Amino acid sequence: MTQTTDAAPNHPALAPLKAAFSAVKMQATVFRGQVTVTVPAANVHDVLRFLRDDPSCDYSMLLDVGGVDYLGYPAPQPGRFAVVYHLVSLRTNTRLRVKTHVSPSLDTTGVVDDPALYVDSAADLWPAAEWAEREVFDMFGIRFRGHPDLRRILMWKDYPAHPLRKDYPLRGRGEREHYQRLSRDSEP
């Protein structure tokens, strides 16, 4: 496990994680006291399961799942998009972020089922991941393999893009100009 930080990460989950996944190339970083472990997408589900089930880690709570688009980011990244899991161990009162990167292999301007933008779902580990993964799918277009109900959650079903991608136009693509305006007296 490579460590690049302000200071070397000192986190109780790093030693058991390194011992259990010695063959997996991971990177541990710390920024402002928050430790992040970057894991390859192929191993992220196994790492999350270990962090939840291993008694020395005991990350029983998933706070959030988020997406990041690194398009135009000044520092090089292993992939354009990242999925970030925010974990909490209630027993040890520690937090840990687990990040994995994916890069599109197809044109990203529209809604395309890109085989490179898949990550295994964590909804089988933490039921709270279901809605958060749907939001990441809806906003970034990253799909979650094994998700029980992967469909849009914020945008309508036939919305033609993923609005939190950095290549999405700030004013949209004309969606606001085509809204059907309803008055208070009109029927839904």
Image (spheres, grey):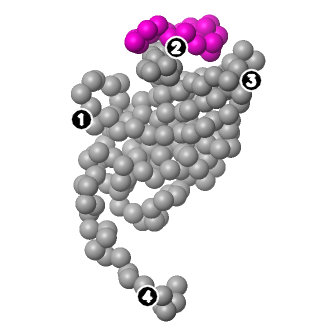
Question: In the rendered structure, which disc, 2 or 3, sits on the residue that comes first in sequence?
Answer: 2
| Residue at x 35%, y 61% (from the top left corner) | 160
Identify the element where label 2 is drawn.
Answer: loop
Does 65 lie within the magenta span?
no
Query: Which residues, given as a range, are shown in magenta?
Result: 1-23
Q: How many marks?
A: 4
Q: Amino acid at mark 3?
A: Arg
Q: Are marks 2 and 4 in contact (CB under 8 Å)?
A: no
Mark 2 surroundings: few (<14), some (14-19) or many (≥20) residues within 10 A: some
Horizontally, residue 134 falls left or right of residue 155, namely: right
* Secondary structure predominantly adopted by residues drawn in magenta: loop
Question: In the rendered structure, which disc, 2 or 4, sits on the residue that comes first in sequence?
Answer: 2
Q: Amino acid at mark 4?
A: Ser
Q: Which residue is mark 1?
A: 72
Q: Which of 161/31 is in front?
A: 31
Of badges 2 and 1, the one in the foreground is 1
Residue 24: image tag: 2
Residue 87 visible here: yes
